[in-house]
Amino acid sequence: MVTDIRLESRVDGVSLWQMAVSGSVFAAGDSGVLEAVARSGTRLVVPVLRVTVDEAGEVWHVVEKPLAAGTEVTGRVEEVS
């Protein structure tokens, strides 16, 4: 579940957001996707550009389009070849 959202940066009209997700399978340096289902039943896929961990140990997923806090998500880490 998305537990927190914060703006990371906004440059030339492009925003990057950080989302905290409870029980995340991601680690610092990972990328992948977060998936959710909208109330309408539409499947939402949000690319995770990178993952950072702050000084408190919170895992932050960097995305271009955040999901609302409280949204149930599943994550899939991209395999590095």
Image (tube, rainbow, N blue to C red):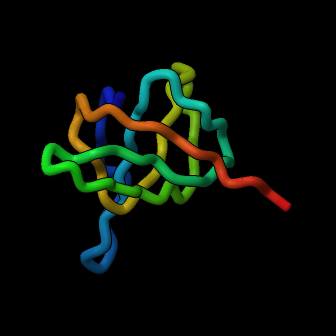
Q: Residue furthest left?
A: 40
- Residue depicted at 21% across the width and 41% down the height: 68
- Residue depicted at 32% across the width and 27% down the height: 3
Q: Position of residue 79 (x, y in %)?
A: 75, 53
Q: Position of residue 80 (x, y in %)?
A: 79, 57
Vertical side of 22 occupied by 66: above or below: below
Q: Nearer the viewer, residue 69 or 41?
A: 41
Q: Residue furthest right?
A: 81
The quarter of the picture where the N terminus appears is top left
- Residue depicted at 32% across the width and 32% down the height: 72
The quarter of the picture where the C terminus appears is bottom right
Q: Nearer the viewer, residue 12 or 51?
A: 51
Q: Nearer the viewer, residue 7 or 45?
A: 45
Vertical side of 75 occupied by 55: above or below: above
- Residue depicted at 53% across the width and 59% down the height: 49
Place residue 4 in its image quadrant: top left
